[in-house]
Amino acid sequence: MATVMTVVGILVFAVGLLVSIAWHELGHLSTAKLFGIRVPQYMVGFGPTVWSRRKGETEYGIKAIPLGGYIRMIGMFPPGEDGRITKRSSSPFRTMIEDAREASYEELQEGDENRLFYTRKPWKRIIVMFAGPFMNLVLAFGLFLTVNMGFGQPTSLPTIGSVSQCIVKAGQSTDVCPADAPPTPAHQVGLKQGDKVLSFDGDRIRDYDQLQADIRKSAGRTVPVVVERDGQQLTLTPTIAVNAVQKFDGNNMPVKGETVEAGFLGFTPKRAVVQQTFGQSLDRMYDMGENGVKSLAALPGKIPGLWNAVVDDAPRDPDSPIGMVGAARVSGEVFSLDIPGSQRIAFFVNLLAGINLSLFLFNMLPLLPLDGGHIAGAVWESVRRRFAQLFKRPDPGPFDVARLMPLAYVVASIFIGFTLLVLVADLVNPVKIS
């Protein structure tokens, strides 16, 4: 049964990925048609065509490899300086430029002269290229709201889940207390599982994060703690100990392998799935977006770890980048777990939301062949035309993005190499859920 559910999880992920890609390309397609640009093809996937159908002037289809998609717009690049579409050269870089230019005109038909992409004003081209990533952002937003407000998020509560018997450093087991380990303040004053903390040192407690912060800054002090037990309120007066506890960063995320001296009471909070308010959901999405940007910037630094995981079979860092194969594997593992069906669905929706957020951030990088590279080209064209108007100079004309194709090939090669490295790591040394 577990194997069947694993396969189901992988298939569900594949469908979700295809929908995300199709949704992205729909953004490009709809805005291109809105501005009168002819679009001969709308394809989900790469490689051989599995299915296609022509409707009007556009062929819609699905290809064999569901790892991307594209729409083909006529006239992505302007003609060369001599007005010609093709101009052969012995220079390999020049050949790259002209091959890209020729490909953007290969389905040119009579009457397309006024339907070319490059002839549209820069702001229209920016909208067309931004619409794809924006659709991913909208989908991520909707999926995150669904998970946070509909299913809820695992949350630490200001309720006692368990009480530690003795004081040990962060990360050490308390199953068996060392002979010289002192008892925890929570154990000394008689805190019990299920006690709900109502106030700490006179401050009304709203959530566990507030309680944790209050405890940490109260080292060495004896403070009144009001708890609710069996419907009645009790006041306890523990003396907060000093201990080496887990260090957290500015986003309240644990810093791996680092501790800090702070106040310590000695209990583990109860965890429960709690539906979030709209405001709480927005806060969580902002944090995820911020962490996504940081993760994207940190990708180059992750390459040595990936290489060691593949070549030397080194332990895979849980924060290591994973590709679509790794994400599908995680989805399959989650579906095979003995957990409520609602939690499986919530995890999958959250995973798909994270992938759509990543697609938005990645595609907005100002590098060809990504959408952000075309946006950057249109912005630069707008700026230089504005300067020409300001200083009463001749219109410089459209910016020839095709000139950047040699750089685009370099960028694409780096992306492909990184993708292959992640793919191999996901196959031979995958990230596994706990």
Image: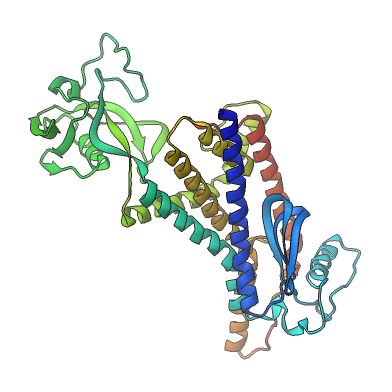
Residue 88 coordinates in the image, percent (x, y): 90, 69
Q: How many marks?
A: 0
Residue 406 coordinates in the image, percent (x, y): 76, 60
Residue 89 coordinates in the image, percent (x, y): 90, 67
Q: From the viewer's perspective, is residue 119 above or below residue 415? A: below
Q: Nearer the viewer, residue 332 or 256?
A: 332
Q: Nearer the viewer, residue 219 or 318?
A: 318
Q: Nearer the viewer, residue 203 or 136?
A: 136
Name the colouring of the figure. rainbow
Furthest toward the front, the residue is 1
Q: From the viewer's perspective, is residue 269 above or below residue 90? A: above
Is residue 97 visible to the viewer in this orientation of the structure?
yes
Residue 216 falls in which quadrant of the image? top left
Is residue 366 visible to the viewer in this orientation of the structure?
no
Residue at (81%, 72%) from the top-left corner?
Answer: 107
Left or right of residue 131, residue 434 in this image: left
Residue at (62%, 56%) from the top-left corner?
Answer: 21
Residue at (50%, 51%) from the top-left corner?
Answer: 353
Q: Nearer the viewer, residue 128 or 344?
A: 344
Left or right of residue 173, residue 363 in this image: right
Left or right of residue 62, residue 140 in this image: left
Residue 80 falls in which quadrant of the image? bottom right
Residue 85 coordinates in the image, percent (x, y): 84, 75
Residue at (62%, 68%) from the top-left corner?
Answer: 28
Furthest toward the top, the residue is 179
Q: Quadrant of the N terminus?
A: top right
Left or right of residue 314, residue 197 in this image: left
Residue 250 falls in which quadrant of the image? top left
Q: From the viewer's perspective, is residue 225 above or below residue 349? A: above
Q: From the viewer's perspective, is residue 12 above or below residue 33? A: above
